Image (cartoon, helix red, strand yellow):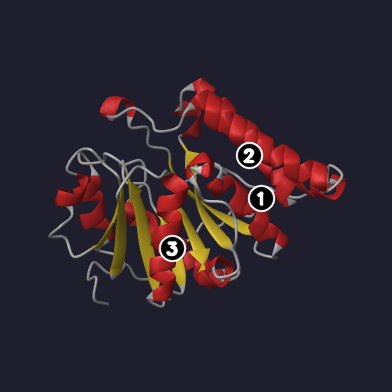
Amino acid sequence: MRATVVIPAHNEAAAIADIARRTRAFVESVIVVDDGSSDDTAARVNDLGVILLRNGANLGKAASLWRGMQCALEAGAEAVISLDGDGQHCPEDIPRLLAAAALHPHRIVIGARLRGRTNAPWPRLFANRFADFWISWAAGHRIFDSQSGFRLYPAALLVRMEIAHDRAHGFVFESEILIEAARLGFLSTQVRIDSIYIGASRASHYRAVVDTWRITRMVAMKLMRRGLYPRGLIRILRTRARLVDVQPTRVSSDPRR
């Protein structure tokens, strides 16, 4: 499977070089989208063999992901893996997402931060579980860690996807794409990964009140448009989430494999 990793990055100079370098060990093509950073994020990856796209201004995570995805699709990627640039995801888990995608090629694969999740700050844990329930309901199947940015998207889904990706939808995009994908027949499979909380390395770009409200409003509107979608609620109450524990048969450190 030809997979391209897309890393949106806004002021991630402290971690981006390490993340990009480690990612290059597992895939040939890595795209870093510098989202109008005011630090030297772009300079840190100049000599690492990645494709660097630069937004002239800070357009938000959704716009950066979308731009990177379109670049990957134009280059012939069969799958796009999104990975945050702040160090909260381990690139070493990429082979596990690829292995799950090989088993389930018509699904989104989510790196679900379930190992050590209970060690998360309780407000974040509550917010994530709250979001998981409502997004699962709207999508019609159970999803663990709907807020994880570490995912593999089949190209066959992305070429059909048309959802808002402007600045106002910066953190709505990743929730909405799970719902719209399910309506197109692309369900989600979850692979357990470690919960890594970066603490004081930088302030979160997520604005708790504004972004939570925007996600809540999006989900509520989708449910109301479907008459509260009782079938979706029944499904998530009756079925288990699709969790896949896979170990790749071969992990190569050669990006030219």
- Which one is nearer the viewer's eye here, 25 or 51? 51
At which x and y percent is residue 105?
A: 56, 71
Residue type, mark 2 in image: Asp
Q: Quadrant of the C terminus?
A: bottom left
Q: Quadrant of the N terminus?
A: bottom left
CA separation in Å, label 1 and label 2: 11 Å
Residue under circle 2?
132
Q: Going by the image, does 170 lie left or right of 130?
A: left
The tag on residue 69 is: 3
Of all residues, the one furthest to the front in this rendering is 56
Give the SS element for disc 2. Answer: helix
The correct choice, above or below, for 210 with respect to 103 in the image is above
CA separation in Å, label 3 and label 2: 24 Å
At which x and y percent is residue 77?
A: 42, 74
Q: Of the residues tagged 3 and 1, which is closer to the observer?
A: 3
- The residue under the point 43% across, 63% down is 69
- Residues tagged 3 and 1 counted as in contact (Cβ below 8 A): no
Q: Total label count?
A: 3
CA separation in Å, label 3 and label 1: 26 Å
- The residue under the point 50% across, 29% down is 118
Q: Dot 1, crowdedness within 10 Å: few (<14), some or many (≥20)?
A: some
- Residues tagged 1 and 2 counted as in contact (Cβ below 8 A): no
Residue under circle 1?
241
Which of the marked residues, 1 or 2, is nearer the chain's N terminus?
A: 2
Residue type, mark 3 in image: Met
Q: Of the residues tagged 1 and 2, which is closer to the observer?
A: 2
The tag on residue 252 is: none
